């Protein structure tokens, strides 16, 4: 079956430090991966995406790494700020029109 | 900035009643989705919709659920006879593009459904 992500962990980081959020996926045929941020009471918000023909993609303060050999995805946030506190979901496009979310990681930034 | 809007923000209903959740996707988007999130849990795919028909649906999306695009702007999710376990936050999303290696989804703020 399709499965993305690990059991929901919680990550606490000090403001200014870098954060790394990890995700495992099981569908080796997936070609497109997305990271979403969800703040309390809001809908998921797109952060960054990556296609399977890439192993790294950078955005503003965020980097996504994809390792297809071990089916692993990570999101790195540089210089983490209090506004980064949220639940982060990796998501996987498993077919033409279906995006499956992982269980999420709660990031807490300590001022 | 264009956004996906959803109504109502919160609906309370009795078990067995019909509920319609409404969404206005971003105007130039062609692909539409419904997801749900039970409190504290992950975001679950329900259904995708393109060209006036369902593209994909999950096992959650049984015959109690239906979707419709009644006009050029609205996209609705109907639950015919609500059950207690339908209580969740329902998110609508839209995307400009489809395909296996593209298709960023833009989400609305959600409609919270409480079934009593």
Image (tube, rainbow, N blue to C red):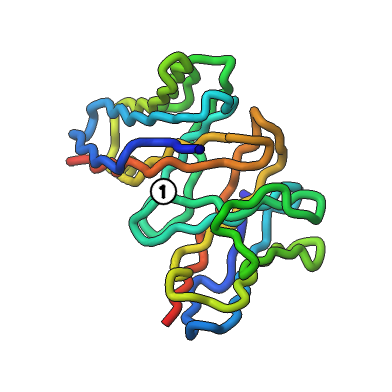
For image coordinates 59% across by 47% down, the residue present is B106
Mark 1 Cα shell of 10 Å, populated few (<14), some (14-19), many (≥20): some
- The number of discs equals 1
Quadrant, the C terminus of chain A? top left
- Mark 1 chain: A
For image coordinates 44% across by 30% down, the residue present is A25
As rendered, which of B64 and A76 lies closer to the eye?
B64
* Image coords of residue B12 (percent x, y): 47, 81
Q: Would residue A109 appear left or right of B37 to someone viewing this image?
A: left
User: Residue B34: in sight, yes or no?
Assistant: yes
Q: Which residue is mark 1?
A: A38
As rendered, which of B72 and A27 lies closer to the eye?
A27
Q: Quadrant of residue B52?
A: bottom right
Q: Would residue A82 appear left or right of B77 to someone viewing this image?
A: left
For image coordinates 33% across by 46% down, the residue present is A86
User: Residue B22: in sight, yes or no?
Assistant: no
* Image coords of residue B80 (percent x, y): 62, 76
């Amino acid at each position: 079956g399709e499965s993305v992500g690990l059991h929901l962990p919680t990550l606490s980081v000090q403001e200014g430090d870098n954060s790394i959020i990890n995700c495992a996926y099981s569908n080796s045929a997936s070609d497109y991966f997305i990271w979403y941020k969800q703040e309390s009471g809001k809908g998921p918000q797109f952060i960054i995406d990556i296609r399977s023909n890439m192993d790294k993609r950078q955005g503003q303060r965020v980097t996504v790494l994809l390792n297809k050999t071990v089916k692993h995805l990570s999101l790195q946030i540089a210089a983490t700020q209090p506004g980064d506190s949220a639940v982060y979901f990796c998501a996987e496009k498993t077919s033409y029109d279906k995006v499956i979310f992982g269980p999420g990681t709660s990031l807490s930034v300590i001022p | 900035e264009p956004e996906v809007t959803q109504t109502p923000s919160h609906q309370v209903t009795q078990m067995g009643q019909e509920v319609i959740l409404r969404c206005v996707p971003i105007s130039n988007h062609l692909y539409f989705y419904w997801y749900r999130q039970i409190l504290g849990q992950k975001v679950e795919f329900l259904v995708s919709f393109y060209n006036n028909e369902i593209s994909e649906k999950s096992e959650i999306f049984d015959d109690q659920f239906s979707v419709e695009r009644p006009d050029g702007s609205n996209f609705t999710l109907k639950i015919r006879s609500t059950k207690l376990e339908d209580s969740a936050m329902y998110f609508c999303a839209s995307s400009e593009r489809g395909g296996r290696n593209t298709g960023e989804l833009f989400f609305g703020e959600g409609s919270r459904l409480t079934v009593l």
